[in-house]
Image (cartoon, rainbow, N blue to C red):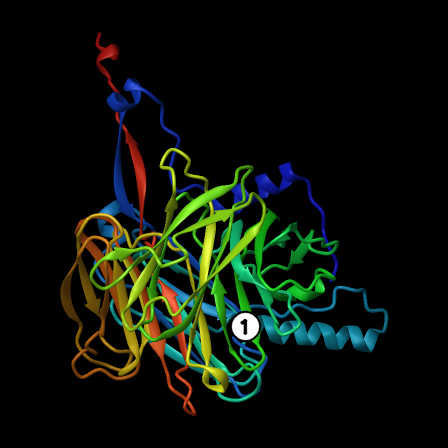
Amino acid sequence: MKSTHLSLIAGTVALAAITGFASLNAPEGPAAEETATASSLPVERSSLVCPAPSTSDLAETTYTSFTPSGQETGKETGKGEGAKDSAELKPALPVLDDEAETDPKKAKKIEEAAKKARAKADKPVLAVKEPGKPVLAEANGSDAPALVGTATGTLAPGWAAQQTTTVTAGGARGLLGVSCTAPDTDFWFPGASTARSRQDYLHLTNPDDSAAVADIELYGAKGAVTSEVGDGITVPARSSVALLLSTLTDEAVNDLTAHVTTRSGRVGAVLLTADDGSGTDWLTAAADPSGTLVMPGIPSDATSVQLVAFAPGENDADVKIQLMGQNTTFAPAGNDTLHIKSGMTATVDLKDITRGEPGSLRLSPVEKNRATPIVAALQVVRGTGAKQEYAYIPATGPVGARASVTDNRAKGSTLSLTAPGATAEVKVTTSAGSGGGEAAVETYTVKAGTTMAVTPKPPAGFKGAYALTVETVSGGPVHASRALVLPEGGVQMFTVQTLPDDGGTVVVPSARQDLSVLDD
């Protein structure tokens, strides 16, 4: 793989050209209040990328995609009239050898292969036709590609997708679930590893028509881990690359924090982890560094919970560890606080902290006036010995106005809701199924400082898979996650997806001009 080095200035210009701006800069101070007001409007375009599901020939993958009902961009904004509403995920292009081929016959074969790949990439794997109804597709084996896609018009606000993969045999057998992510420029992954028992692959997917360039930094318990090949990783246009973390350094480190940034362009980044004999799953990026973090939805039967945290700034962090249980918030015995040194990764073994009740973890500063920003994630284990399986719960933002998660089955879905501040009321909508059925709505009250585990009632007459949409009705912020359990061979295989705000609306200032000065 060749590396392309661009200046920071060029990268910034390219990023601005690619991403555009969601809002305009408004004047500050009283004049701004007199001349401008802001309104919240539905977005008219969304992007998602999904990594290549698996390298196992035994892999069975289900893709689902969904846009919630309720927002029509054209009617509400007066824009986009005549624009086509679409929400399609298409195969990413394969990464071909970029060395010049001198043999004419080989060069012709390479060009023919590239032409076929481009033709295949023009055919959607998933295409949502209408809001409120998920669509489903399946792929088997190791040839399932990474996906890139865009939603426009009425299908853009809240567009969500998921891929769920089952691998039933092998050292890294398990259930792998990942919500397809929006491309970005900065990602944190507490919980990575370069240990010999682990196979951690960082997947970088570029949805745009020009190459992106990314840098990868690793931090362990002693600080930065030496790596000479983590800089200037080129991700070709509309393509995806997977990098084995252990090839970036000679150091075998059990618990790491990986930091991914882009010099130019944007990517979707997720980490595929596999531990011989213990399972496998995706680790999605944690919420941006903050003084207070929430990791929602630790299963009631968790046999082991490990917290991994990192302080990226110049200051050490001292945080309180609290479990928001079914009825109250409490500090785990012997692990009520954690000191995190600047630039170093810290870990805490919380063992079977939930003890038969659902829970969520909250980290907050010991001293309120010293809220040092940190990132964090949990590795959660269910079962023991050869019957164990693990999943990750990264720190996540609140549901906000709305969040959705797809690929819920007739059995095995559990929705966890936690209110770290004030008591809150939320509305949970169960969509129609991909093969039919009727949507249903339930309202729940989540008491302050507690976690509620909800078993969704599948939609009446449903077939296939359905989506869950959570909306905050009143009260304080709510954090949520969905656990999907698919037992196989005596193993309670599971995966957990968090539900941060879907970003379906954007605040747009609308200027007002005082024309009185033009009076004759």
Above or below 483: residue 396 = above
Q: Which residue lies furthest to the top in this view?
A: 520
* Residue 195 at least partly seen: yes
Badge 1: residue crowd in 10 Å (few <14, some 14–19, many ≥20): many
Q: Name the residue under label 1.
A: 52
- At 35% from the left and 79% from the top, the residue drawn is 485
The image quadrant of residue 209 is bottom right
The kind of residue tagged 1 is Ala
Residue sitting nearer the eye, 412 or 107: 412
Horizontal side of 290 relative to 78 (left or right) equals right
- Residue 238: x percent and y percent? 57, 62
Element type where label 1 sits in the image: loop
Above or below 95: residue 315 = above
Above or below 236: residue 515 = above
Q: Which residue lies furthest to the front in this view?
A: 334
What is the count of numbered marks? 1
Rendered-image quadrant of the N terminus: bottom right
- Residue 174: x percent and y percent? 48, 81
Horizontal side of 204 relative to 67 (left or right) equals right
Residue sitting nearer the eye, 340 or 64: 340
- At 40% from the left and 80% from the top, the residue drawn is 137
Horizontal side of 214 relative to 270 (left or right) equals right
Q: Which residue lies furthest to the bottom in this view?
A: 489
- Residue 19: x percent and y percent? 49, 47
* Residue 78 at least partly seen: no
Rendered-image quadrant of the C terminus: top left
- Residue 144: x percent and y percent? 53, 78
